C-alpha cells in the first residue's frame, strides 16, 4: 500500500491553476493536504528601487513612463472591477458549481484545510508554521525564490512546477522565450527545490509541440493544463516510491527574465496570430472614460430617456465557448462569464429569443433593459460551464446548433488551425439543455458561409439542419443564426431561402441593437468574450462603448452617402468583421 503523503502548498498566487491543483490533491488518497501557505508578495522599498534602477538601465528612461502608465491602469482596473463585487461572483460560483471554489480561502473552507497568509515565505514565522505542520512534501506554485530555511523543512523536500524546459528555459515568463527563440517545442518540468533558480533535480518532465498559431498566452495556458497533470502524477509517484529524481545537465545555462517592451513588440511583429493589445495609455483612457460615464449614472439615464421617448430596445449578446483553456475572441473564461451574468441579472431583464422575436414581429415595445443571450456552434463547454451559471440565475438562453457536428469529433473551420481541440455537444446534452430552459435554433448543418454557396446548397443546409434538430429535440425549430454573419455574407437571396425553409427569424453578427422596427430576418447581435469586462459590457449594451460609437458614426456616414431613394434606417450599415473578430475590432482604436 502506498503511503499517504502529508502535503503543504506553498504559493504566491490565488490563480485558477493553483486552485485546480489544490482541489485535485485534496481528493487523492495518496495525499493529505495539511495546509496552504500564501505569500503576500510584499517587497521592501529598497528592493523595489533596486529593481527599478536595473530596468531603467536595461530599457532606458522611457521605462519610467511605462511604469507610471501601468500604475494608473492598475488603479483604474481596480475601480472597474468594483462594478461586480467579488463576493457576489463567489456566491454565484458556489451555487453553480458545488464542490468547486474560486479562491484558496474557499477551498480551505470546503476541504477543511487551514490557510496561512504570511508576508514572506522565507521569514522565520513562515518556517515555524511549516515545521508545526510536519509535512512530508511541499508543493511550490508561483512563489518567490525560496531559501533553504523554508524548502528544507518537509521530509522529502519541495516540488516546484516550472512551466518550461530545464535547463534551457529557467526563469520566466512561461511560453514567451520559446516563441521568441523560434523553438518548435516547449515543456513543463517538476523538480525538487534547491538553492538555485530552477536548478533542482528533475522528478518529471513533458514536452509540448509549439503550434503555428500559438501566442505567449495560449502557450502558457497549454503549459498550465499539462503541468497540472504532471505535478499530480509526480506526487502520486513519490507516494508509491517509484520515482528517482535525476540531476540536470551540467554547464552554464541562461536564466530567463521578463522581456523588455522592445522584445514584446518584436515577437508581436513576427507572430501573425498574436493579437495586438491596445497601447497601455489608450486602454487607461478608455477605462477612465467608461468609469466616468458609469459613476455619473449615464447608463440609467439613457434607459430612462429611451423609455420616455418610446424607443426602448434590446441587445443580443453572442457567445461561443465558455472555458478556461483558449485565449481568443470566441472564448470567455468561466469567471468572466459569471461576472457578465451577474451584471445582466442585476441591471437588465434577460428575455428568451422567442419573446424577443414575438415583440419584433408584433411591433411591440421592449422593456427598457432587455437582453438576450445566444451561443453559436455546438461546443460542449456550453453544457459543462455555461449551463450551471445560467441555471443558478434562472436565466434563459438560446443555443444555435450546427447539426452536422453534434455527437461527432469534427472541428469547426475556424478551429482547425488552432492548438486546442474542443468537444462538441451530444444529442442527449442538447435535450438536457432544453430541459434546463434553453431554446435551440439552427446554425446550418456544416457551418457554411451561405453567402458563398449556391442557392441549392444553401436551401439544403437550411432545411436539413431544421429537420435534424427537430428530430433530435422533438420540438419545432423556428430560429436561425447566420454563420459568420457579416452583411457581405447575408445576400437577399439567402434571406428569402431562410423564410422559405420555415424560420420565423434570422440573427446576424454585424453589431447593433434590436428595436420594434427591426427586420425579423436581420436581427443584429453584439459579440462578447473573455476580454469584455463587466464595465465594457454595460457600455456596449447602452450604446456608449467606443465600438458602439464607431458603428453609429459609420451608420451616419453610410446614410449620407446612399442615394435618398435607397436609404433604409432599419438596416445597420457598413461591412463589419466576422463574429470571430467582432469584439476585438470594436475594442481597438
Image (tube, grey):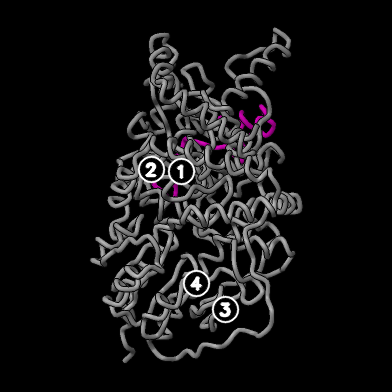
Mark earlier in primary sequence (2, 4): 4
Which residue, given by chain and number where applicable, does mark 3 sit on? Answer: 199
Q: Are marks 2 and 1 in contact (CB under 8 Å)?
A: yes
**Mark 4: few, some, or many residues within 10 Å (few <14, many ≥20)?**
many
Residue 161: assigned label: 4
* Quadrant of the drawing holding the N terminus: bottom left
Q: Which residues are magenta?
A: 470-499
Mark earlier in primary sequence (1, 3): 3
Question: Closest to the observer: 548 or 575?
Answer: 548
Mark earlier in primary sequence (2, 1): 1
Mark earlier in primary sequence (1, 4): 4
Residue 121, image x, y percentages: 39, 67
Mark earlier in primary sequence (4, 3): 4
**Mark 3: few, some, or many residues within 10 Å (few <14, many ≥20)?**
some
Camera-side mark, 1 or 3: 3
In the image, residue 474 lies in the stretch drawn in magenta: yes
Alpha carbon separation for disc pair 4 and 3:
12 Å
Please give the name of the residue rendered at 69% of the width and 62% of the height, measured from the top-left corner: 179
Residue 98 visible, this orientation: yes
Amino acid at each position: 500500500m502506498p503511503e499517504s503523503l502529508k502535503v503543504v502548498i506553498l504559493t504566491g498566487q490565488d490563480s485558477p491553476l493553483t486552485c485546480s491543483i489544490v482541489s485535485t490533491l485534496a481528493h487523492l488518497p495518496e495525499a493529505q493536504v495539511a495546509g496552504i501557505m500564501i505569500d503576500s508578495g510584499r517587497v521592501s522599498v529598497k528592493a523595489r528601487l533596486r529593481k527599478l534602477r536595473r530596468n531603467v538601465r536595461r530599457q532606458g528612461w522611457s521605462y519610467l513612463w511605462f511604469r507610471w502608465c501601468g500604475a494608473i491602469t492598475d488603479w483604474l482596473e481596480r475601480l472597474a472591477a468594483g462594478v461586480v463585487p467579488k463576493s457576489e461572483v463567489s456566491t454565484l460560483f458556489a451555487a453553480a458549481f458545488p464542490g468547486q471554489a474560486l479562491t484558496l480561502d474557499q477551498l480551505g473552507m470546503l476541504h477543511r484545510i487551514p490557510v496561512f497568509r504570511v508576508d514572506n515565505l522565507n521569514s522565520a514565522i513562515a518556517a515555524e508554521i511549516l515545521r508545526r505542520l510536519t509535512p512530508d512534501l511541499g508543493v511550490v506554485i508561483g512563489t518567490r525564490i525560496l531559501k533553504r530555511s523554508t524548502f528544507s523543512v518537509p521530509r522529502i523536500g519541495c516540488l516546484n512546477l516550472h512551466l518550461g524546459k530545464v535547463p534551457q528555459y529557467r526563469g520566466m515568463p512561461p511560453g514567451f522565450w520559446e516563441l521568441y527563440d523560434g523553438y518548435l517545442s516547449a515543456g513543463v518540468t517538476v523538480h525538487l527545490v534547491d538553492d538555485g533558480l530552477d536548478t533542482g533535480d528533475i522528478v518529471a518532465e513533458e514536452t509540448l509541440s509549439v503550434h503555428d498559431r500559438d501566442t505567449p498566452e495560449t502557450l502558457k495556458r497549454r503549459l498550465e493544463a499539462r503541468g497540472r497533470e504532471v505535478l499530480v502524477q509526480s506526487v502520486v509517484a513519490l507516494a508509491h516510491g517509484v520515482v528517482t529524481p535525476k540531476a540536470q545537465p551540467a554547464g552554464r545555462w541562461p536564466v530567463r527574465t521578463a522581456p523588455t517592451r522592445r522584445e514584446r513588440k518584436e515577437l508581436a511583429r513576427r507572430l501573425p496570430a498574436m493579437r495586438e493589445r491596445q497601447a497601455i495609455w489608450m486602454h487607461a483612457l478608455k477605462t477612465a472614460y467608461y468609469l466616468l460615464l458609469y459613476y455619473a449614472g449615464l447608463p440609467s439615464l439613457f434607459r430612462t430617456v429611451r423609455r420616455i421617448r418610446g424607443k426602448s430596445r434590446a441587445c443580443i449578446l453572442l457567445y461561443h465557448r465558455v472555458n478556461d483553456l483558449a485565449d481568443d475572441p470566441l472564448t470567455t473564461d468561466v469567471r468572466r462569464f459569471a461576472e457578465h451574468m451577474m451584471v445582466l441579472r442585476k441591471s437588465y431583464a434577460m428575455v428568451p429569443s422567442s419573446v424577443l422575436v414575438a415583440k419584433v414581429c408584433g411591433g411591440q415595445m421592449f422593456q427598457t433593459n432587455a437582453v438576450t443571450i445566444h451561443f453559436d456552434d455546438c461546443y460542449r463547454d456550453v453544457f459543462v460551464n455555461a449551463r450551471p451559471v445560467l441555471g443558478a440565475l434562472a436565466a434563459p438562453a438560446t443555443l444555435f446548433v450546427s447539426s452536422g457536428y453534434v455527437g461527432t469529433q469534427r472541428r469547426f473551420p475556424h478551429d482547425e488551425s488552432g492548438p486546442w481541440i474542443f468537444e462538441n455537444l451530444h444529442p442527449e446534452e442538447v435535450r438536457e439543455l432544453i430541459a434546463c430552459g434553453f431554446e435551440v435554433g439552427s446554425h446550418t448543418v456544416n457551418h457554411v458561409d451561405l453567402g458563398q454557396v449556391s442557392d441549392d446548397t444553401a436551401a439544403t443546409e437550411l432545411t436539413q439542419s431544421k429537420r435534424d434538430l427537430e428530430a433530435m429535440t422533438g420540438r419545432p425549430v423556428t430560429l436561425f443564426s447566420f454563420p459568420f454573419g457579416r452583411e457581405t455574407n447575408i445576400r437577399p437571396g439567402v434571406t428569402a431561402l431562410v423564410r422559405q425553409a420555415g424560420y420565423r427569424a434570422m440573427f446576424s453578427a454585424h453589431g447593433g441593437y434590436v428595436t420594434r422596427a427591426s427586420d425579423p430576418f436581420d436581427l443584429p447581435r453584439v459579440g462578447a468574450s473573455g476580454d469584455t469586462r463587466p464595465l465594457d459590457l454595460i457600455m456596449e449594451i447602452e450604446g456608449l462603448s467606443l465600438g458602439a460609437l464607431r458603428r453609429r458614426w459609420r451608420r451616419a456616414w453610410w446614410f449620407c452617402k446612399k442615394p435618398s431613394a435607397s436609404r433604409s434606417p432599419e438596416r445597420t450599415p457598413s461591412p463589419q468583421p466576422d463574429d470571430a473578430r467582432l469584439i476585438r475590432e470594436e475594442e481597438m482604436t
